[in-house]
Image (cartoon, rainbow, N blue to C red):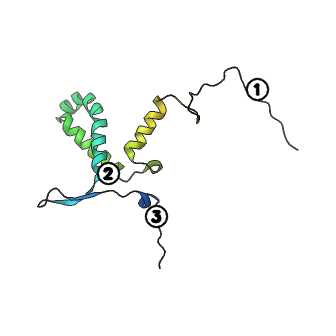
Amino acid sequence: MTKQYWTSYRSLFRFSGTIYRIDSRTRLPGPIKVDTIIIFIFMLAILYVPCWLLGPILRGGFNVDVWFADIVFAGAATYFFSNFDPAGKFLPFYILDIIQFYYLPKKHRVGTSFRPDKRKRENGEYFLLD
């Protein structure tokens, strides 16, 4: 029996679905992963607000509608992030973890809120071992 070598742990645990056809008669030009579709929808929702804020510039300077710019930017971001696997997590979950880290209250492992003891201070003394 030959040994199997894995280039990444990701291939061991994540199996993503792939779409080859829209219906029984219509073939897609290439396979599309379901993860890619989810990342595209996620980026479409996130990038709508910046595109809406840049709407007057996009309409005046480039004669481009906000939705068209949003779809193009989301497509470019999806292409960039399609193989991005930060910390072994799916990209939307990774961004959700970052948001939760900054906005939710910090907790200890026990489950109580983190409240540093302001009365206790470190005096910065140290000793040397000979």
Mark sitting earlier along the chain (3/2): 3
Please give left or right for residue 128 compared with residue 104 in the image. right
Where residue 99 sits in the image (x, y, percent)? 43, 34
Q: Quadrant of residue 127?
A: top right
Q: Nearer the viewer, residue 88 or 57?
A: 88
Three-letter code, disc 3: Thr
The image position of residue 3, as x and y in percent, is: 49, 74
Query: In the figure, is residue 3 to the left or right of 61?
Result: right
Q: Secondary structure at mark 1?
A: loop
Residue shown at 45%/37% (left/top)? 98
Q: CA distance from mark 3 to mark 2?
A: 20 Å
Q: Earlier in the sequence, mark 3 or mark 1?
A: 3
Tell me which residue sits at (28%, 52%) in the image: 34
Q: Position of residue 88 (x, y in %)?
A: 46, 51
SS type, badge 2 = helix
Instruction: Kindly give the residue lying farthest to the top in the view shown.
Output: 119
Residue 71 falls in which quadrant of the image? top left
Q: Report helix, strand or loop for mark 3.
A: loop
Residue 108 in picture, x, y percent from top left: 58, 33
Q: Residues within 10 Å of mark 3 (few under 14, many from 20)?
A: few
Q: In the image, which is nearer the foreground, mark 3 or mark 2?
A: 2
**Which residue position holds label 1?**
123
Mark 2 = which residue?
35
- Name the residue carrying label 3: 7
Asked if 1 appears above or below 65 in the picture, the reply is: below
Q: Residues within 10 Å of mark 1 (few under 14, many from 20)?
A: few
**Residue 37 shows which numbered tag?**
none
Q: Residue furthest left?
A: 25
Among the two numbered marks 1 and 2 on one chain, the one whose residue lies closer to the N terminus: 2
36 over 61 or under it: above or below: below
Give the image quarter of residue 48: top left
- Furthest toward the front, the residue is 110
